[in-house]
Amino acid sequence: MTLFLDGDALPNQLKPILFRAIERFSITTFVVSNKRIDIGKSKIINYIIVASGPDEADKRIVEMLKEGDLVITADIPLADYTISKNAHAISHRGELYTTANIKNRLAMRNLMQEMRDCGMPTKGPAPFSPKDAHLFANQLNKFLTKQKTVA
């Protein structure tokens, strides 16, 4: 399994959590972003900087993604693609995306986008909190521990 981090919107609070997990589980990792994102130095962490522009990091992850890989992203369309390729995705807030929930998340995201496009005011996501970081850490540890016992 390879870990891909969609680095463009990665909350700073998750960087030490991710670094510890990467080292503990010895996971080859690619941090993909359109600017330098540093989560730590390690022989198994690779940094890829893509061109500026919408979805450039997502496109690179899609090019590299293989079945069974894990993607950390807040991007619902990328998570949907990941799930469709029999890979795994976890949100920054600790939600494990699955075939059972991703289509509903995608439909809600598209509905909210249509509302914004029509000029309707919508509320964005709540600010990232320590509780979100805790939920993420728990989900990541649970997922990686399960993968380790399966392997």
Image (cartoon, helix red, strand yellow):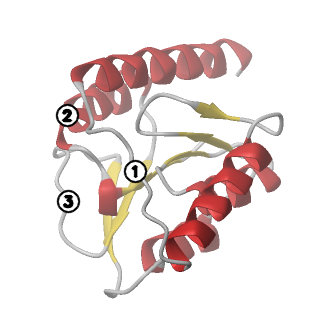
Q: Is residue 88 visible?
A: yes
Residue type beneath disc 2: Gln
Give residue 130's position: percent from left, percent from top.
23, 21
Marks 1 and 2: CB-CB under 8 Å?
Answer: no
Residue at screen point 47% across, 24% down: 140
To which residue does mark 2 refer? 13
Residue 118, quarter of the rendered image: bottom right
Which is in the foreground here, disc 1 or disc 3? 1
**Could you tell whether 135 is left or right of 40 in the image?**
right
Check the image and report above or below for 34 versus 144: below
Residue at screen point 35% across, 46% down: 44
Q: Nearer the viewer, residue 147 or 91?
A: 91
Q: Which mark is residue 37?
A: 3
Residue type beneath disc 1: Lys
Residue type beneath disc 3: Ile
Question: Which residue reaches farthest front?
Answer: 120
Q: Which mark is residue 123?
A: 1
Q: Rounded to the nearest whole Å, what is the CA distance between mark 3 and mark 2? A: 13 Å
